[in-house]
Image: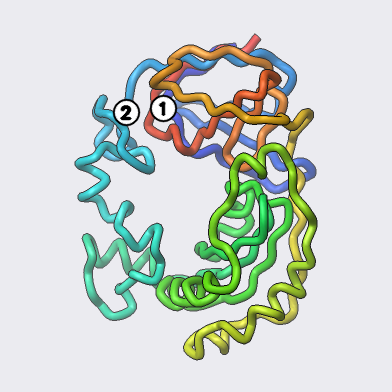
Amino acid sequence: MQYEGVLRKMQTEIGNPIQYYMVFENDFLNVNQILDKELEINFIKFQCLNCGRDRPIFRQGFCKTCFYEIPSAGDWIMRPELSTAHLGKEDRDLEYEKKAQLQPHIVYLANSSNIKVGVTRKSQIPTRWIDQGAHEAIEIVETPNRYLAGITEVALKDHIGDKTNWRKMLTNNVDDENLEEWRNKLKQYIPDEAQQYYITDNSETILDFPVLQYPEKVKSLNLVKSPNYKGILKGIKGQYLIFEDQTVFNVRSNEGYYVSLQIS
């Protein structure tokens, strides 16, 4: 089987285990079905997810020009506390920002390599947790806009981490935690503006990833340095493909790379 197209973040479907899909312009691949098979990846060219041109990818699948111009790559994406649509203030495109920012957002705790706090649109639960490789997660605050979620995350970051150790996550060197206890412990640090949105009546979600074999020590595949790679696929966790030789490939960080995939 052969597939060809520009890489985008794998789409997922909750299940036991989670189902993963690579979606191309005219085709798609259920990645779970090729576990234990040999996968060859060949890098062909760049293709910016916005302009479609063959330009080096700068960040988030976009070339440098698009990254600094398009509304979907504004600073408020990575830093929700910078959101201003609730004030009617434009960053790059107010109508786009209103649609993205003025909708329910969740502040959550996720445990992938350690417990971390994060923010996402409510519509992205549990997708966001899956993308981060979290084996357990819980919502702690639901706000009506991105700004309130952002300032809540900033306040909680003083008391709990906000980063994932991807190497630890991929080797599955993780501990289970009581996230309901953590949620209750952190309530006192939620800003006054967001206290009314605190969630008290939920329980943690457990996530099951399709991994046959975890690596002991990971080595990351860089398609620019190694444009051709071949290996036996042993697992999928977060947005990573895990291979038998302990190579891992982050599909999301390679968005905008046009590749061919050969399965045998």
Give neighbour class at mark 2: few <14, some 14-19, many 20+ (Cα, 10 Å).
Answer: many
Q: Measured along the vertical axis of the image, is residue 161 above or below residue 140? A: above
Viewer-proximal residue, 163 or 134?
163
Which type of secondary structure does the marked residue at label 1 adopt? strand
Color style of the picture: rainbow
Q: Quadrant of residue 177?
A: bottom right
Instruction: Estimate the spatial distance between the alpha carbons at disc 1 and disc 2, rounded to whole Å.
Output: 7 Å
The circle drawn on residue 6 is 1
**Residue 246 at what x, y percent from top left?**
66, 24
The circle drawn on residue 48 is none
**Residue 253 at what x, y percent from top left?**
45, 37
Q: Quadrant of residue 240?
A: top right
Lateral position of residue 128 relative to residue 225, left or right: right
The C terminus - image quarter: top right
Q: Measured along the vertical axis of the image, is residue 163 above or below residue 178? A: above
Chain-order first, disc 1 or disc 2: 1
Give neighbour class at mark 1: few <14, some 14-19, many 20+ (Cα, 10 Å).
Answer: many
Q: How many marks?
A: 2
Q: Residue at coordinates 61% horizontally, 42% vertically from top-left?
A: 238
Q: Measured along the vertical axis of the image, is residue 247 above or below residue 253? A: above
**Residue 259 at what x, y percent from top left?**
44, 20
Q: Residue at coordinates 74% horizontally, 49% vertically from top-left?
A: 174
Toward the top, the furthest residue is 264
The N terminus - image quarter: top right
Q: Quadrant of residue 51?
A: top left
Q: Residue at coordinates 34% horizontally, 70% vertically from top-left?
A: 83
What amino acid type should be assigned to the residue bearing mark 2?
Gln
**Residue 116 at what x, y percent from top left?**
61, 61
The circle drawn on residue 47 is 2
Q: State yes or no: discs 1 and 2 in contact (Cβ < 8 Å).
A: yes
Lateral position of residue 62 relative to residue 144, left or right: left
What amino acid type should be assigned to the residue bearing mark 1?
Val
